[in-house]
Image (tube, helix red, strand yellow):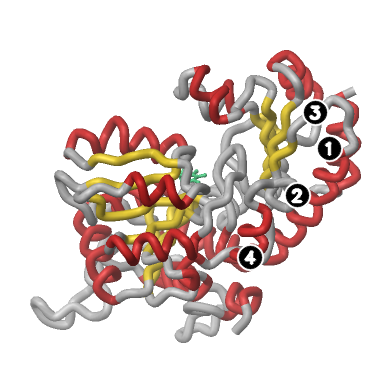
Amino acid sequence: MRAKTKMIHGGVTGDDKTGAVSVPIYQVSTYKQDSAGNPGDYEYSRTGNPTRHALENVIAELENGESGFAFGSGMAAITSVMMLFEAGDHVVMTDDVYGGTYRLMTNVLNRFNLSHSYVDTSYPDDVEAAIQENTKALFIETPTNPLLKITDIAKMKEIAKKHNLLLIVDNTFATPYWQQPLNLGADIVLHSATKYIGGHSDVVAGLLAVNSDDLAEEIHFIQNSAGGVLGPQDSWLLMRGIKTLGIRMEAIERNTVKLVEFLQGHEKVSTIYYPGLESHRGHDIAKNQAAGFGGMVSFDAGSGDEAEKVLSRVHYYTLAESLGAVESLISVPAKMTHTSIPAGRRAELGITDGLIRISVGIEDADDLIEDLAQALA
Ligand SMILES: *Cc1c(COP(=O)(O)O)cnc(C)c1O
């Protein structure tokens, strides 16, 4: 099955009992047992729920994995993955990981003596140099937020293999439609399904897929023990979102390409960050490891004041955090998602006050361009 067909026919489809073509929402916590200690397939919904299982099967198929898992948020998925490690272990991570991941490592998991190093993983030599005796994993995000930096997943696998590390990929920005890290050797792929996979700004959820039975068993043990599971209603909403993930990603990328062309010709716009541009440092790797470049684009409007003006004038871009929805979203990372990073460090990374990030939606591209044109004028 090809990706778009998997989105419709993959995993568990419909309901055998009634012929319903949509998987029913099993709004239930517990299940009747035939005799004491003899449960059927399901016994308690934290451990397993048929609606959640249907979703978990779809994400496994989309990522070419053996097993999938659904969590109450992307952060719950990431937290569960970190519970694979123990006190004294160390993880090497992409330096501009999602802010919530940064906070989890720096302000929560540090309490349990799980240490980490941040590295610009787009430079493989730096990754290798950061590995310590107690390093157990590489945790990468590609493309990153908001500068869309690209990390070579296959190269990371080489390093992980050499040093006996788990390779964990946050695939939120690329989606399983464009990029399948398990195919490139990753051990664990995870998503904030709140973004493109849900796609409609109406669910907070996390998804994860693995290829090994041992890892699957451990992750299920942690999922059931820590309990950060996704409920049946939200599982159903994600399955509905997934049915259109392929056509949404294609529409989003078509719009993004047009918007980037417009931005390239605009006198007020200096640097544009989009992996689809040949001038982007990670362009060749992105082209190699992903089937598409995605719908996130950042550009420099010159100054914080200019960025502020653009935000106040746009009509079709909603000023909001988050990304990956059918509606276009706009943000200024320096004032919104990246405020916790000191100004000096932000400048070093290239996250200037004038940097605007857009998550392109599926509106008419001409409306998006006209709106941005009047806002920049
Ligand atoms: C949003 C996001 C997360 C966290 O996911 P939630 O669903 O908000 O908990 C993790 N990684 C990336 C790349 C994200 O964009």
Q: Which of marks 1 and 3 is in front?
A: 1
> Counting residues from the N terminus, which is met first, the one under dot 1 or under dot 4?
1
Q: Is residue 54 left or right of residue 147?
A: left
Q: Is any part of residue 66 visible from this angle?
A: yes
Q: Mark 1 points at which residue?
A: 263
Q: What residue occupies the far top of the structure in this picture?
A: 305
Marks counted in the figure total 4
Q: Does the residue labelled 4 lie within 8 Å of ligand 1?
A: no
Residue marked by disc 2: 277
Q: Are marks 1 and 4 in contact (CB under 8 Å)?
A: no
Marks 1 and 3, the one that precedes in the sequence: 1
Residue type, label 3: Val
Amino acid tagged 1: Leu
Residue 164 image offset from top left, x and y in percent: 27, 63
Q: Distance between the residues labelled 3 and 2?
A: 25 Å
Distance from mark 1 CB to nearest ligand 1 atom below 8 Å: no
* 268 in relation to 168, above or below: above
Amino acid carrying mark 2 in the image? Leu
Q: Name the residue under label 4.
A: 288
Task: Residue under label 3, please give it.
Answer: 314
| Residue drawn at point x = 78 percent, y = 29 percent | 270
- Spatial CA distance of label 2 from label 4 is 14 Å
Name the secondary structure under disc 3.
loop
Left or right: residue 322 versus residue 252 is left
Q: Which of 56 and 335 is in front in this view?
A: 335
Residue located at (30% from left, 47% from top): 91
Q: Position of residue 25 (x, y in %)?
A: 45, 66
Q: From mark 1 to mark 3, how far is it between C-alphas?
A: 15 Å
Please rate how many residues cluster around mark 4, counting C-alpha atoms within 10 Å: few if below 14, some from 14 to 19, many from 20: few
Q: Is residue 29 visible?
A: no
Point out the frontmost of discs 1 and 4: 4
At label 1, counting other C-alpha atoms closer than 10 Å, the crowd grade (few under 14, some 14-19, many 20 or more) is some
